[in-house]
């Protein structure tokens, strides 16, 4: 098995081809990794979330790590990992995020699932810095 | 969409049913999330890795987060997340780890892929604390 370093272009492709990634954040001495659904656009990932632990942690410490991995059908895999900064979006930014997510998922805005009852939707983006990619081809 | 909290038993099932997870670690002011292949056994995940950034970081700060997520064919998903502690394994522990991994992957020990050239295999386990599980059924 040899691990291959991906080009910038292929790393970008891993980010753009997937919709589930994970954010790693750290605050109060604890590290937390949480899966999120995202839309990738021009070096940032856009997320619509509900208030909760990850949002509280990223408000406290906006420096995070973003990770995506995918498995091929023949047992190979590709991954992309980047340091990034959490940016919470205002109303205008949230509109953009929701449009990107709707476009990515091929749904009309009106049909997106409502947030869990009693919770508020928080839209944010993670601005990625120098994503690096790895792959094992099989 | 409503997010369901999984029972202890089903959370355990998510951990046992999967083989790819992610470790989130934090050292020197940076958070890092990295995908790993693991075998789950009695509250711990066992990993055989090569020396590198994640090993250096976990030696510096053994308090980590472990995450697994899986998507169902109909668009639902399950995830398990736990705080955990990195424990590097000695020769005897490494034998156990490699046996668990071989068993999990149904391979004979002799046939496991060699580590990347010039790098050394490091076996470790993450002892998980109170894994929590979430699911969306669709």
Image (spheres, coloured by chain):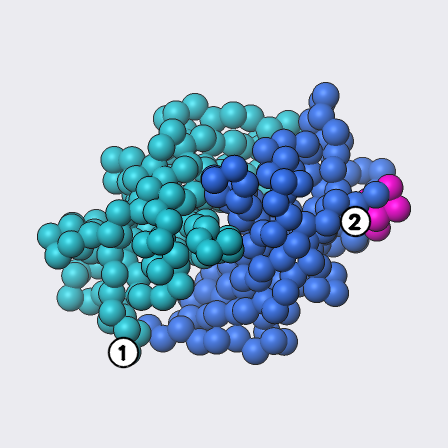
Chain colours: A blue, B cyan
The answer to which of B127 and B19 lies nearer the viewer is B127
Residue for point 25% across, 69% down? B120
Q: Which residue is tagged 2? A: A97
Mark 1 and mark 2 residues within 8 Å of each other at the beta carbon = no
On screen, residue A92 versus residue B94, left or right, reads right
- Quadrant of the drawing holding the N terminus of chain A: bottom left
Spatial CA span between label 1 and label 2: 45 Å
Q: Which span is picked out in magenta?
A: A91-96
On screen, residue B58 versus residue A86, left or right, reads left
Q: Which residue is tagged 1? A: B118
Task: Please check the rendered image and state whether residue A95 is part of the magenta-colored stretch, yes or no.
Answer: yes
Discs 1, 2: same chain? no
Q: Chain of mark 2?
A: A
Give the SS element for disc 1: loop
Nearest-to-viewer mark from 1 and 2: 1
Q: Chain of mark 1?
A: B
The answer to which of A46 and B13 lies nearer the viewer is A46
Residue A5 coordinates in the image, percent (x, y): 48, 76
Q: Quadrant of residue A83?
A: bottom right
Residue closest to the far left: B92
On screen, residue B64 versus residue A39, left or right, reads left
Q: Quadrant of residue A117?
A: top right
Q: Please say whether residue B101 is visible from this viewpoint.
A: no
Count of residue discs: 2
- Quadrant of the drawing holding the C terminus of chain A: bottom left
Residue A131 coordinates in the image, percent (x, y): 59, 67
Residue closest to the far right: A92
Residue B43 coordinates in the image, percent (x, y): 29, 35
């Amino acid at each position: 098995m040899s691990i291959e370093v991906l080009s910038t272009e292929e790393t970008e492709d891993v980010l753009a081809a997937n919709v589930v990634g994970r954010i790693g954040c750290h605050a109060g001495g604890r590290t937390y990794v949480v899966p999120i659904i995202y839309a990738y656009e021009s070096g940032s990932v856009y997320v619509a979330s509900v208030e909760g632990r990850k949002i509280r942690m990223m408000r406290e410490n906006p420096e995070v790590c973003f990770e995506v991995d995918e498995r091929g059908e023949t047992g190979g895999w590709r991954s992309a990992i980047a340091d990034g900064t959490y940016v919470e979006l205002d109303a205008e930014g949230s509109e953009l995020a929701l449009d990107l997510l709707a476009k990515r998922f091929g749904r009309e805005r009106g049909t997106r699932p409502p947030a869990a009852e009693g919770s508020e939707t928080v839209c944010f983006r993670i601005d990625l810095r120098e994503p690096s990619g790895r792959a094992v081809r099989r």
